[in-house]
């Protein structure tokens, strides 16, 4: 993820810490495992920020229920797993294109305010969420996707290193983060827990002397 010379990086805590990239934590709940054919049902994005002590924490959250795109596949097993009813009459959802337009705009604004050049995806099993983001971007011909096209921070890998656990619930437990299995599999809840886990690992590494700001 090299951006070139260090002097090209803005003098802000976020830009310095991640070499011009701004981590954004994403969780997607969907109607199956195929990013090209299966519906996105919910998406959440958590934008972190540094406090005065140099600790990373949650700063802003975007969450939206999503109307499945035309012709999208939805597996019954996926709905049973997540507990999402995409046909509920009181479900407040937006079209996929509008959802991504709004989310990308918010992320681009945060990138600019943090002096960064691009966002980098953070997710638990990041390849999965990354695939759905890229598929939606291609499907709607969206311009200015703020995310790096393939690089990411995978909290499954990071928590395996830091805590010896790769399942989100168990990694949170090992990190001392409260986790409710009854609230899990909501994009907003899982994104928040993933963000807490990611920020905790970054802060733990700082406290061990790994990266002083």
Image: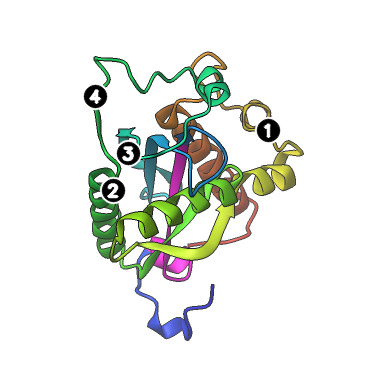
Q: Is residue 27 magenta?
A: yes
Earlier-in-chain disc, 1 versus 2 = 2
- What's the distance in space between the residues labelled 3 and 1, CA to CA? 23 Å
Residue 100 in the image: above or below residue 71: below
Residue closest to the far right = 164
Q: Quadrant of residue 65?
A: top left
Numbered mark located on residue 167 in the image: 1
| Disc 3 element | strand
Q: Which residue is mark 2?
A: 103
| Earlier-in-chain disc, 4 versus 2 | 4
Label 4 crowd (10 A; few <14 / some 14-19 / many >=20) = few
Q: Is residue 141 magenta?
A: no
Query: Who comes first in sequence, dot 3 or dot 1?
Result: 3
Comparing marks 1 and 2, which lies closer to the viewer?
2
Q: Nearer the viewer, mark 4 or mark 2?
A: 4
**Mark seen at residue 61:** 3
Q: Secondary structure at mark 4?
A: loop
Residue under pointer 4: 92
Please give the name of the residue rendered at 23% of the width and 55% of the height, measured from the top-left corner.
105
Q: Work out whether residue 29 or residue 196 is closer to the camera in this orientation and state it.
A: 29
- Label 1: which secondary element: loop
- Decide: few, some or many residues near mark 2? Use Cα within 10 Å; few <14, some 14-19, many ≥20: many
Binning the other alpha carbons within 10 Å of mark 3 as few (below 14), some (14 to 19) or many (20 upward) gives: some
Q: CA distance from mark 3 to mark 4?
A: 17 Å
């Amino acid at each position: 993820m090299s951006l070139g010379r260090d002097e090209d990086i803005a003098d802000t805590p976020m830009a310095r810490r991640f070499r011009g990239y701004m981590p954004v934590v994403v969780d997607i709940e969907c109607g199956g495992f195929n990013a090209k054919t299966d519906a996105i049902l919910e998406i959440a994005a958590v934008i972190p920020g540094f406090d005065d002590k140099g600790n990373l924490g949650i700063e802003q959250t975007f969450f939206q229920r999503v109307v499945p795109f035309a012709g999208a596949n939805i597996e019954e097993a996926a709905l049973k797993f997540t507990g999402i009813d995409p046909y509920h009459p009181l479900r407040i959802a937006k079209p996929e294109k509008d959802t991504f337009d709004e989310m990308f705009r918010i992320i681009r604004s945060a990138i600019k305010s943090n002096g960064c050049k691009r966002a980098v995806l953070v997710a638990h099993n990041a390849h999965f969420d990354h695939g759905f983001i890229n598929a939606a971007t291609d499907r709607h011909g969206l311009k200015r996707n703020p995310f790096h096209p393939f690089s990411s921070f995978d909290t499954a890998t990071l928590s395996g290193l830091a805590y010896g656990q790769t399942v989100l619930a168990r990694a949170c437990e090992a990190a001392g983060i409260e986790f409710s299995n009854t609230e899990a599999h909501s994009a907003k809840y899982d994104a928040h827990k993933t963000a807490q886990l990611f920020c905790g690992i970054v802060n733990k590494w700082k406290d061990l002397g790994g990266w002083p700001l």
